[in-house]
Amino acid sequence: MRAEVAVHDCAKLLEAVNFSASKHRDQRRKGAEQSPYINHPVEVANVLAGVGGVEDVDVLIAALLHDTVEDTGTLPEELERQFGDTVRRLVEEVTDDKSLPKQERKRLQLEHAPRLSRGAKLIKLGDKISNVREIALNPPADWPLARRREYLEWAAGVVAGLRGVNERLENRFDEVLGMARRLVG
């Protein structure tokens, strides 16, 4: 029975990778290297599984899909049809409302972080690990040091509201943040 579950889980994860790659196919990261956007959600899911020991397939699928609603016009109902209610809810929890001004979205992330579900906190932690790493090693060409420093402090504030959910991910965030602070100055 366990082997059948594992095969089904692997198939669902690969379906999510394919879905996310298709949705993000024309997008690039903001970093100077302009890497394919799909690298980001794959990195988030990989950090959750590899560093955090996360085995919940719905959380890993939602990590792969976490930016689809926010950045690609994917409808939550589409995610629910293909991946189920749990995945849709997790993605919605970590999705910013793009109709709001950027500063308001950032403020709401700080405010909402402590109230997220366990799965959404894990995804948000993985997202911040990936983004802080990117800001340190491959920042957007047009971001001066002050903006990069501001992002790092804001991300640390968001993660402060996520603490207590996964010590290994929190430790990794602290390592990446420390490295980023050394590089950014």
Image (spheres, rainbow, N blue to C red):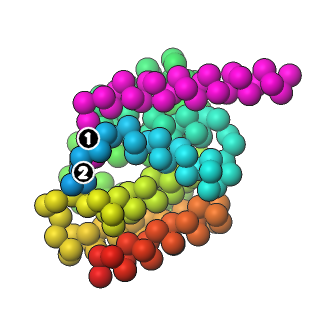
Image location of residue 62, percent across then percent down: 52, 37
Query: In the image, 175: left or right of 32?
Result: right
Query: In the image, 82: left or right of 75?
Result: right
- Circle 2 residue: 33
Asked which quadrant contains residue 58, the reply is top right
Q: Which residues are magenta?
A: 1-29
Find out whether the residues at labels 2 and 1 contact each other: C-beta distance under 8 Å: no
Distance from label 2 to label 1 (Cα)? 9 Å
- What label does residue 66 carry, if any? none
Q: Amino acid at mark 1?
A: Arg
- Circle 1 residue: 28
Of badges 2 and 1, the one in the foreground is 2
Q: Residue placed at 64% from the left, 63% from the top?
A: 168
Q: Amino acid at mark 2?
A: Glu
Residue 10 colored magenta? yes
Query: Where 103 sits versus 70, above or below?
Result: below
Q: Residue placed at 38% from the left, 37% from the top?
A: 38
Q: Secondary structure at mark 1?
A: loop
| Whether residue 154 is visible | no
Disc on the earlier residue, 2 or 1: 1
